[in-house]
Image (cartoon, rainbow, N blue to C red):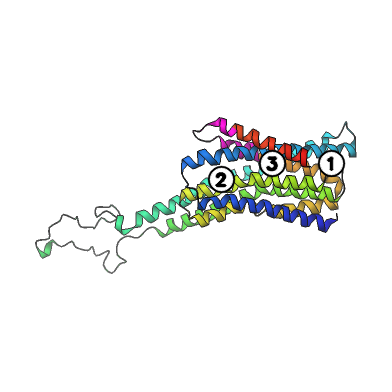
Amino acid sequence: MGLAAATLDAFLATCFTWAVTAAGAALVFVLPPDEATQRQLLRPMLGFAGGVMTSASFFSLLAPALELAEDQLGRRWSFVPVAVGFFLGGAFLYLCDVYMETQQIHDPLALMQDAVLGRKAKAKADSPLRRSPRSSSNPYATPSNARLRRPDALPRVPSSLEGGRGPPQPDDDSTAKKAAAARRAVALLVFAITLHNFPEGLAVGVGFGGAAAGLAGQSRAKAMNLALGIGLQNFPEGLAVSMPLKRAGLSSYKAFLFGQLSGVVEPVGGIMGAALVTLVTPILPYALAFAAGAMIYVVVDQLIPESLAGPSQNKQQTLAFMGGFGLMMVMDVALG
C-alpha cells in the first residue's frame, strides 16, 4: 500500500469519525436540552468515550510505538522516543490551553453560552411589550393610572427630546461590544475544538501510514479498528457541544452545526499523519506517542471532569468508562 492509498484510507476513515460526530450532534433535534437528559444520558456517554480513548491510546498507539522503537533502538532505549512523543503531545495541548487562558478564555463553550444568553436577555429587555411604564429607562413615561382632566395636565416633552428619535435607545457601543464578544466566542470555540480533535485524526492517519510502510505492529485492520474506536467516542462529543448550546438559546440547527464542527478537522489530521509517516518512517514512534499523549490529555482535562460534573451518580460514569476501555481493548486485540 503506497502513499496515495494510505492517505485515501486515512481520509475516508476520518470522514467516518466526522460523520459519527455529526450523528451525535444531531440528537439535539430529538432530545430535550434539560439537566435530566444531560445527567442521565450525556455524562455516562462521556465516561464511555473517556474509556475508549484511554484504551486506544495504549493498545493502538503506545504499545505499537514501543515495539517500533525497540526495533530501531533496542529494548533498553526504546522508551526514549515514546516518552518524548507522549510528553510533547500533552505539552502541546497544555500550552494551547495556557494561551487561551491568557486571552481570558477558560471555557470557550461557556463563553459561547453566555454570549447567547446575553443576546436573549437583551432582546427580552428591549421588547416594548415587556417595558414597564414606570421603567427607569423611560423617565418621561406617564403612569397608567394618571387622570388627564385638563389639557395642561398632559405630560410635556422636554425640549431636549423635541425632534429627537423617541424613547432612549439601547447603547449602540454596548450592542456592538456584545456582538463582537459573541463572534470571538464562536472563533475560540472552533479553535479549542480543533486543537482537541486534531490529534485523533492524526492518530488514524499515522496508523494507516505505518501500515503502508509495512512496519512491525502496524496493519490496515488495526488502523481501521482505531478509527472505529475514535468514532465511538466522537458520538457523545458531538452531543456534548450541541446540547449546552441549545440550552443556552441557540436553535437546534445552529447547535448542530457547532456540534459537528468537532469532527471537521479530523480528516485534515488523518491526511497529514498518513503522508508524514509514509514519507518519513523513522518518526512513527514519536508520532504515535504524540497522538497518545494528546488524547490522554483530553481525557483527563476534558472528558472525565465533564462526565463527573454536577450532582449525579458517579458510579454510572465509572462503569461506562470501564465498558469503553474493555470494548476498545477487545476490538484492538481480537480484530487487529
Q: Which residues are magenta?
A: 298-317
Q: Give amino acid for label 3.
A: Met
- Secondary structure mostly seen in the magenta stretch: helix
Give the residue displayed 81% in from the left and 50% down from the top: 209
> Are the two marked residues, 1 and 2, in contact with CB atoms closer than 8 angstroms?
no
Q: Earlier in the sequence, mark 3 or mark 2?
A: 2
Task: Quote the CA–CA distance across marks 1 and 3.
Answer: 20 Å
Up the image or down, 68 lies above or below 124; here it is: above
Residue 261 appears left or right of 206: left
Q: Give amino acid for label 2.
A: Ala
Q: Quadrant of residue 1?
A: bottom right
Q: Residues within 10 Å of mark 1 (few under 14, many from 20)?
A: some
Mark 1 = which residue? 217
Q: Give amino acid for label 1.
A: Gly
Q: Mark 3 falls on what kind of element?
A: helix
| Nearer-the-camera pick, 61 or 225 | 225
| Nearer-the-camera pick, 58 or 114 | 58
